[in-house]
Amino acid sequence: MSIESDLYLAKDYDKKYCMQVFAPLDVAFVKGKGSYLYDTDGKKYLDMIGGIAVNSVGHAHPKLTKAIAEQSKKLIHCSNYYLIPSRSELAYRLCKKSFADKVFFSNSGAEANEAAIKLARGYFHYKGIDKYEIITAKMSFHGRTMATIAATGQPKFSQPFEPVTPGFKYVEYNDISDLQSAITDKTAAIMLELIQGESGVHPAAPDFVKAVRQLCNEKGILFIDDEIQTGVGRTGKMFCYEHYGVRPDIMTLAKGLAGGVPIGATLCTEEVSSGFHVGDHGSTFGGNPLATTAANTVLDIIESELLVENADIIGEELMDKLQAIKAKYPLIRQVRGRGLLIGIEFDPLISAKMMKDVLLEKGFLVSSIGTSTIRIAPPLNIKKYEAMSFATAIEKIMKAQAKNK
Ligand SMILES: *Cc1c(COP(=O)(O)O)cnc(C)c1O
């Protein structure tokens, strides 16, 4: 028996040989198609989490698998010492679609944020201005590297690894006066998620975001927009900042950009790009032919299949349906989010882990956050009946729970 089909062996080896940071569920997937995944027993699941907002065009999209296969037969990797035409094309396309004029490619979200933090500091350094402090929000999430755990406004991620990288400050999310009082003449940047994904899908208030932009303009501070989870169509716009009518100075992307092939991107204005000179930053893998070809293909699919529009439409229909279920069952406390990034918060009596397990049993994949919230971030090409089948499953569970209580 191969380890592919022997779940017990896989579990045993995971425990023995993998560093125990994930606590995986007792399920392994062997293939996917569209919005569905299939486990080692052939059981089918509707993937409502999409690899945490990564599988933006679903599983095994024929155009994406073909593009990756064909590129791998030609050239997977060559160094950034040479021109990479697919990298040039991807940078051009991302700039055309956004506020940005320049892009740097890496391999993950945390790396994209590392580059953003360095870029903001480099920008002031080269101007001869002594500004280096970065203000972020409490309950934010910006990654797992040493600088990004310092940026993340949740001490549990950084405390065991102290001393933390200096130069970060935290303010209440959606509280402009708290932000105002944290700004000093050393403040280089304000870094925010426009929807706090990892801590429970909390959207930023429109007034807050507008006031942040205003403050940044007045005080010569850079606005870093972490769109690693919200970017590339997820919220029903190509980028979440478009909902707010403001433009950041730096934006980071990763998760959904290449449909599952690792990639990170740090975008900025022409002005801010002066923060990096030749040799100041780099990456061995970042922007390689395979990853940038995958991302270009994801953008092709998003454009030709109107997936930003689909995320907007299906997201709204699903949100309406979930709100209607909430109105019937007070065990649902709140339904939050935008487009296809939605958090469902339950009464504290209902544990998120229980919900996740019951949904798994019924063939739906979600993630649980904290004690009583579940998050969904399905593929952007999810179909209406698929999304509605998830809402129906939630309704059935609520009905059963309401009877028990
Ligand atoms: C996932 C995430 C990150 C970190 O991305 P990795 O690829 O896991 O390093 C950073 N910021 C936000 C908003 C994220 O959702």
Image (cartoon, rainbow, N blue to C red):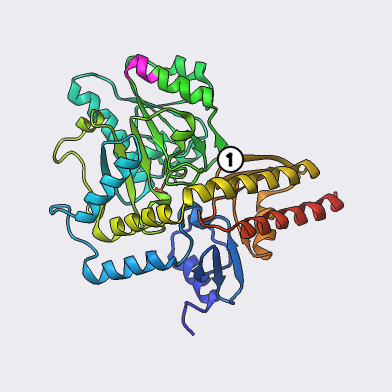
Which contiguous range is marked in magenta?
Answer: 216-220
The residue sitting at 44% across, 65% down in the picture is 61
181 displayed left or right of 283: right
- Is residue 375 magenta-colored? no
Q: Position of residue 320 (x, y in %)?
A: 67, 44
Q: Position of residue 151 (x, y in %)?
A: 40, 34
Q: Is residue 200 visible?
A: no
Magenta segment, prevailing SS (helix, strand or loop) = helix
Asked whether 8 or 196 is in front, the reply is: 196
236 displayed left or right of 295: right
Q: Position of residue 4 (x, y in %)?
A: 47, 77
The residue sitting at 60% across, 63% down in the picture is 46
Q: Residue furthest bottom?
A: 1
- Residue 39, compared with residue 342, is above or below; it is below
The residue sitting at 50% across, 66% down in the picture is 15
Asked whether 334 or 302 is in front, the reply is: 302
Label 1 neighbour load within 10 Å: few <14, some 14-19, many 20+: many
Q: Quadrant of residue 76?
A: bottom left
- Residue 397, compared with residue 211, is above or below; it is below
The residue sitting at 52% across, 69% down in the picture is 29
- Residue 228, compared with residue 7, is above or below; it is above
Inspect the image, locate mark 1, and give the three-letter code of the amino acid beneath it.
Answer: Gly
Which residue in the protein does label 1 denote? Answer: 337
